[in-house]
Amino acid sequence: MSCRPILFTSFLLTPFLLAASDRIPLAGTWRFQLDAQNQGRAERWYDRTLAADSIFLPGSTDEAGKGVKVVEPETGWLTRPYKYEGAAWYQKDVVIPPTWAGKRILLFLERPHWETEVWVDGRNFGSQNSLSTPHQYDLTRALSPGPHHITICVDNSYKIDVGTRAHSVTDHTQTNWNGIVGAIELRAAPAVSIESVAVYPDIAAKQVRIAVTLHNITASPAAGTLTADVAGLTGAHAATWVRDIVGSQTAELTVPMPEARLWDEWAGEIYQLMLTVFDDRVEIPVSLRQISTRGTQFLLNGRPVFLRGTLECNIFPLTGYPSTKVEDWERIFRIARSYGLNAFRFHSNCPPEAAFIAADRAGFLLHVELPVWSSAVGKDPKLDDFMRAEGFRILKAYGNHPSFTMLCLGNELVGDDAFMDGLVAEFKQSDPRRLYTFSADHRRRLPGATSDYYVTQQTSAGRLRINGTRFEKTMDGTDHDFSAAAQPVTVPLVTHEMGQWAVFPSYDELAKYTGVLKPRNLEPFRAQLEARGMLDQAHDFQLASGRFSWAIYKEDMEAALRTPHYGGFFLLQLEDFPGQGEALVGLLDSFWDSKGILTPEEFRRFSNQTVPLARMKKFVWTSDETFTARIDVAHYGKQPIEAAHTLWSLNYDSGELPPANLPLGSVTTLGEISVPLSKYTRATHLKLAVHVSPDAQNEWDLWVYPKSLSTEPPPGVLVTSAFDDSAKAALAAGRSVVLLAPGLQPMRFTPVFWSNAFFGTQPGTLGIFCDPAHPALRQFPTSRHSDWQWWELTEGAHAYILDDTAPAFRPIVQVIDDFHRNHKLGAVIEASVGNGKLLAVSLDIATHLDARPVARQLRRSLLDYAASADFHPRQNLTVAQVEALLSK
């Protein structure tokens, strides 16, 4: 009698407890031969012993160093030292034991890439082409006891137009590798055995309906009792008599689970179900959970849930393919949970079995996509057939996993809408255990007629995330949400790819690339940074740009949380994206290691089940105003909170708001804060902190400036907007000159969106970097990085390009340039020029100062510095160098 655990799947997958006598592992050395000219089939390589080479499986041709050696680095993504596309042949000898006589024998290939074709002793057993599920071949007819040789042709040629940027095949992420990874083995089952299992939970009735496909390889009909028992649960037993089993036949039974606890995002409650028929026993984990919708909200077991998700784009730099190890995925989900996330979107790919198992245990909600990012959907019969078949394969292989809550046809699909809606309808009808949508973002600005939810950046009524245009004319505060844009949509809305703000690389992580993917594309940028004397600043640039970028991420995430009855967001993304122009947009690097930008504790303040929120009109205030803010809280916890207490503080002021009940799935207004700012006679950085019991807290930065402030130059200092003869004469005479003139490099407030190499029309700056303790900034409160108050100064400004200065030349306020370009940029610089001292400012601190308190304050601070004893520049510029910096 055998015991074969299926582990939530419908195929005979990953048998961790399978008896050794019932499987033959095929991991190890295989005979191997590349077939770049595609001659193997015509020359019948399956009929001969391959002797050209050998390779170790599981693995890829990249890992084995097979293929064409790549000499030049890739541009825009990581480099594969060896690259191969085409047919590759793998061959191994096996000996079938006498005890397998009369048994069903399957060849199991957990994750090949891409198409496989199998021969046994020269006999063909067909081909399979799934990018998402194991390839399984029934070899019962060929594998009698004794020696045999198995030949597998793996072809990663691009035969189906899934889209060259689809993360299932693209070199921008996992690479279009050739090989077989994960479990590779022969599996034996009794003559009458359990072939597959589908589990349909019913949380209202506290039971599961089990559809069991039985398979009989004998010529005689079989009959027997199919029993089901759940370990540790009283009364969880069912049995049914099954008769006339010939070939494949499905039997159903319902198993009561009255004592079972529900699976949710906090407790991955998993039980072990034992199915027995004849001499076959299968152990399969089962759970009770229901994912559904009500209006524009998701419901998990009837409770509103808000998706706080990130993307997983098949980024595995060491191997070039996704891990098939549960422990690797457990680490990823553990890290994501520490940042308050509860959901993952698999961008144009479906992960291996290990990811589902780990997500089940961790309580994560998975949005899985067909491995497609194409503009030919519904117009290419080969693609359409593949999508239909692949979707049903994914549902059958992983459909029992409680974490598998959402299925999507692919990313940013373009094509025939009717085909997409129809395919969604087919999947929904076949498997009601999850929610479905037609595409992740789309040119169609409303969801398809059959979609249960909608993942998009923009509806017909507006955008659902921040983009650069929000800050082109004004810098508002936090008093907004996505309600207006969401209004036309009647299903749950999830923001597509929220964020995408670039972060400067520190280059420390280059040493981590010890596997098949090499950061050769980043090495020239590092060398350029070093040549311009700034390599020692790379880590500072990363932290400064990262803190700024994630301040904008925070505001975007909170805008979604402020939106009543919203569905959630998928960030792009928590970790770096190494392709598409080196889109290093992550809080973490490509290895899921922290960059030190934000701690998990800081991140959970605005990414958690309960998040305090502040609605304020602006971030910048003046001392004649009264600061006001409405305090809300988004609550998507385990249960409602009664009489929640709210404490707030704003530097020296503090208070308490009236107790409030927090229902589930709500955005509740807690009260108003009002603080007169007249006490702040000097520019001050304020921090608003809010704590909602029992343990939710959040905070926001804002600034208050004097209502009026003298902007007149101090005695003895020449303030000029032109580097003309008067300015040069003053410097020659040993005077101090403050030059207010723009530079040559355009700036903007927001950092680079995604990648300046990929979207090259951007100014391409990443905010500022400075030393707040520098005496020039003594009267201008700031962090080391850009923050909301810098909008007034940096949006539309022009920085000085300082590439021709000495390597050690450092601005007072440095502008971080995009790492693809690495200009040394300055917004405020100081230098000795001849006998005089120059303070040059490329930011506008001269116009409309009555309405620009930030510019007014910086002007005052800089002018006073220029008149002070502290103004002693230690670096030099020539007159010609100064002239070269200025906009003509």
Image: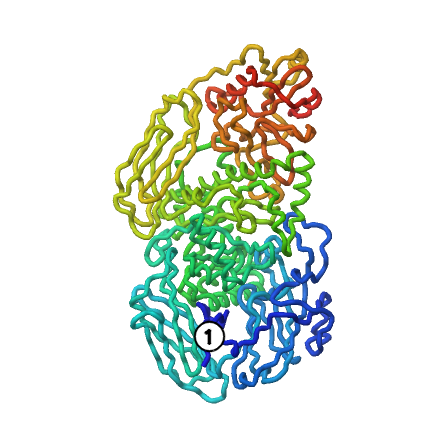
* Residue 50 pos. (x, y %): 71, 74
The quarter in which the C terminus is drawn is top right
Can you say whether 182 is above or below 796 in the image?
below
Q: Which three-letter amino acid code belongs to the residue tagged 1? A: Arg
Residue nearest the observer in this picture, 783 or 726: 783
* Residue 786 pos. (x, y %): 52, 33
* Residue 61 pos. (x, y %): 66, 63
Instruction: Please state if 837 lies on the left or on the right of 656 as rendered.
Output: right
Can you say whether 542 is above or below 202 in the image?
above
Which quadrant of the view contains residue 523?
top right
Residue nearest the observer in this picture, 431 or 683: 683
Instruction: Please state if 666 lies on the left or on the right of 606 as rendered.
Output: left
The quarter in which the N terminus is drawn is bottom left
Residue nearest the observer in this picture, 351 or 488: 351
Q: Going 52% across and 33% down the picture, which residue do you hit?
A: 785
Q: Going 62% across and 70% down the picture, which residue do you hit?
A: 28
Which quadrant of the view contains residue 199?
bottom left
Residue nearest the observer in this picture, 391 or 585: 585
* Residue 485 pos. (x, y %): 42, 44
Q: Is residue 583 visible to the viewer in this orientation of the structure? A: yes
Instruction: Please state if 298 lies on the left or on the right of 350 as rendered.
Output: left
Can you say whether 182 is above or below 316 in the image?
below
Query: Callout 1 environment at 10 Å: few (<14), some (14 to 19), or many (20+)?
Result: many
> Which residue is denoted by mark 1 in the rendering?
4
